Image (cartoon, rainbow, N blue to C red):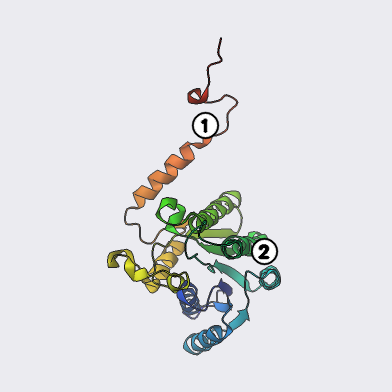
Amino acid sequence: MTDIRGRALVTGASTGIGAVYADRLAKRGYDLILVARDGARLAALAERLGEETGRTVEVLRADLTDPIDLATVADRLATDASITLLVNNAGMSLNGGLIDNDASALQRIIALNITAPTLLASAAGKVFVERGGAIINIASVLALAPELFDGVYSGSKAYILNLTLGLAKAYAESKLRVQAVLPGATRTEIWERSGKDVDAFPAEMVMEVDDLVDAALAGFDSGETVTIPPLADEGQYLAYDAARKALAPGLSRRDVAARYRVAVPA
């Protein structure tokens, strides 16, 4: 494509899902700002994409668990009028769960999986609602199935899903677009980094990262707010979502539900 769509800022762009988003977005006509800790990998990716697509690709090395680095990226989103898309992709998993990790590991996953995407979405959203723009938040199918994995990681991804749904509802009439992408098991380095072996899963459960991103962008193109690339039966999610919404009228009432009423002894 030769059209220019503005500039996309992609976090966690040095490898995996983020790197493939960078590739696909450059080929769609976006200039890029690539954000990650690994400056050497970012530079190599930027050089390749620049040569292949002719797009301008900038490297912004940042550790999003560092408040100063995070503030720098948020400020860029708030002040650079050329940015029209944020891909909130950076994230991590733990080796083990809540009980197995120390405070520093738990603080790090919360900082990267929750604090960083929240502040970046806030910075981008404030300007996108007026001038137009989109936020793609990478969540996980575990947002819908917390029992399948450790609760810290799945909880962080449920937060991302909730954040996206809340933005979609609150700003439906604005120029802001939001999408949550819920991958299943995908072949990326996150497994090795957290001491897990993705090949321990049955082969039919593991999606290749290129397929994941292409499907996610197809969902984005069709206007989906929630995209679940591995889910064959969309009706299952729609039924789940309808059942969830049906709970709303009964979730806050003056009277205690009958099953919780305790008889007062005579």
* Apparent side of residue 85 relative to residue 228 in the rendered image (left or right): right
* Apparent side of residue 76 relative to residue 153 in the rendered image (left or right): right
Q: Of the residues shown, which amino acid type is indicated by label 1?
A: Gly
Q: Which residue is mark 2?
A: 123
Look at 65% across and 62% down and name the residue there. Answer: 119
Residue 184: x and y in percent read: 39, 62
Instruction: Place residue 140 in its image quadrant.
Output: bottom left
Is residue 12 placed above or below 101 in the rendered structure? below
Instruction: Place residue 209 in its image quadrant.
Output: bottom left
Q: Do residues under tags 1 and 2 come within 8 Å of each other at their CB atoms? A: no
Label 2 neighbourhood size at 10 Å, few (<14), some (14-19), many (20+)? some
Is residue 20 placed above or below 158 in the rendered structure? below
Residue 30: x and y in percent read: 54, 76
Look at 48% across and 40% down and name the residue there. Answer: 245
Foreground of the two, 138 or 92: 92
Q: Which residue is mark 1?
A: 250
- Element type at mark 2: helix
Residue 92: x and y in percent read: 52, 67
Residue 162: x and y in percent read: 54, 51
Is residue 180 placed above or below 263 in the rendered structure? below
Q: Of the residues shown, which amino acid type is indicated by label 2?
A: Ala
First in sequence, mark 1 or 2: give its number. 2
- Element type at mark 1: helix
* Apparent side of residue 59 relative to residue 191 in the rendered image (left or right): right
Nearer mark to the viewer, of 1 and 2: 1
Mark linked to residue 84: none
* Apparent side of residue 114 relative to residue 213 in the rendered image (left or right): right
Label 1 neighbourhood size at 10 Å, few (<14), some (14-19), many (20+)? few
